[in-house]
Image (cartoon, grey):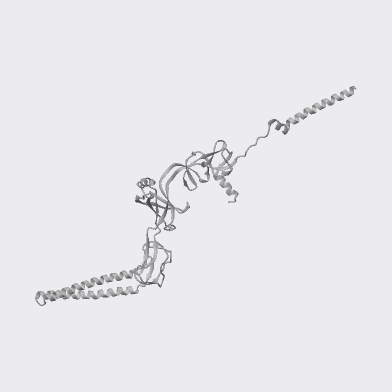
Amino acid sequence: MPGIIKSSVTFTAGFALAALLGGFLLEGSGTGRAAKEGPPRITSAAVEVPVTPVTKRSVPVYLEYVGTTDAIRNVVLQAQVTGYLTQRPVPDGSDVTAGQLLYQIDPRSYQASLDQAVAQAQKDTAALEYAQASNHRNFVLNKAGDVSLDMLQQSTSTTGQAKAALAADRAAIETAQLNLTYTVVRAPFNGRLSLSQVSEGALITNAGTQLNTLVQLDPIYVTFNPPDTDLAEIQKYQAQGAIPAEVMVGDATKRQYHGKLTFLDNSVGRSTSTITARATIDNPDRTLLPGQFVRVRLHIMDQPDTLLVPQVAVGSNQLGRYVYVVGPNNRIEQRFVTLGAGYGPLVAVAKGITEDQRVVVGNLLKIGPGALVDPVPAASVEQAEVARDGG
């Protein structure tokens, strides 16, 4: 019996020791910590976003309108004499220079008329010389009483008639020279031809026959109609000097034409409340043509200290336009903004941001107000994309 009691005591002590060690093992295990600390915390990864600082600089201020282009000079080339067309050396639609030969009408009959008029003038010149000599002789003889007064008067009349005939000959020569000149049609100014209405070999039977149309393209007019509410501002800056004008076609932003405001009408339309204005635009490449609809901007002043952000950074919703900026602790803040004019890839911001802020320009669909971000300079992101794409 004493041996049995000892074994029981030994077993009890061993069980207690095992229980104690099990408690220590449970305390040191992950399950034990989880039971003690509760559910694990979930941390959100920061989204990498490209950012750029707000730009501050002077920007031009424009008044923008829709206008149409007009040729400064637009003439119809017409024949002034009849005859066969012998030459048309310039193709349709060509750019020509002042004085360039465009059409040649057969000149032979007009050269013959000129030669005839010159010959007649030579004949009448000789007749005048004889009449003058005869009249002088009769005048001397009349003084001596050898020639009657009637004969002297006849020789004086003959001299006057010979002078009149020679004057008529000179007029005929001038007319013949003009007609000969009209057989050649030259460009009156630099411009571009339209479609020819006649071809070589055609008989031009009527003076005034239309041959072609020539328009001047450089420079070119742009006509537009500012509202009368802009008139005072335009006149204010026009008084300080010529107002520069810029012209763009369609949605183009890179291709611009430059000139200046050269005309304001003297009255405002009562039915439209607009005034007719015109700018003269340089068109050295002749790519602007009369009749085009264009956008014309008057550069009236430069506005200093204007805040600009990339246009790609601007979003919109039902509340208005906004940009995302990086706030404290790299948290996204949504700022609603009032926008001004666009300047290429940038747009002016009149209200809603400050100069010291950083604007998010990429990954806009992956973030929202309060999102945690990892901002990186936009240039670095572009370089990384180029390297990734093998550029």
Comparing 91 with 356, the one in front is: 91
Residue drawn at (51%, 46%), measured in percent from left and top? 311
Question: Is residue 143 visible in this depiction of the protein?
Answer: yes
Residue drawn at (25%, 74%), measured in percent from left and top? 122
Residue drawn at (27%, 71%), measured in percent from left and top? 172
Residue drawn at (16%, 76%), measured in percent from left and top? 134
Q: Is residue 126 left or right of 72 when viewed as pictured?
A: left
Give the percent coordinates (x, y) of residue 28: 73, 31
- Tell me the quadrant of the picture where the N terminus can be found: top right
Q: Judge whether 153 appears above or below 299 on screen.
A: below
Residue that sits furthest to the left in the current view: 145
Residue 137 figure quarter = bottom left
Q: Judge whether 63 appears above or below 331 on screen.
A: below
Question: Is residue 132 visible in this depiction of the protein?
Answer: no
Residue that sits furthest to the front in the current view: 271
Residue that sits furthest to the top in the current view: 2
Give the percent coordinates (x, y) of residue 79: 36, 68
Residue 184 figure quarter = bottom left
How many discs mark residues in the rendered view? 0
Residue 12 figure quarter = top right
Residue that sits furthest to the right in the current view: 1
Q: Judge whether 341 appears above or below 34 on screen.
A: below
Q: Judge whether 165 appears above or below 233 on screen.
A: below
Give the percent coordinates (x, y) of residue 289: 43, 58
Give the percent coordinates (x, y) of residue 123: 24, 76
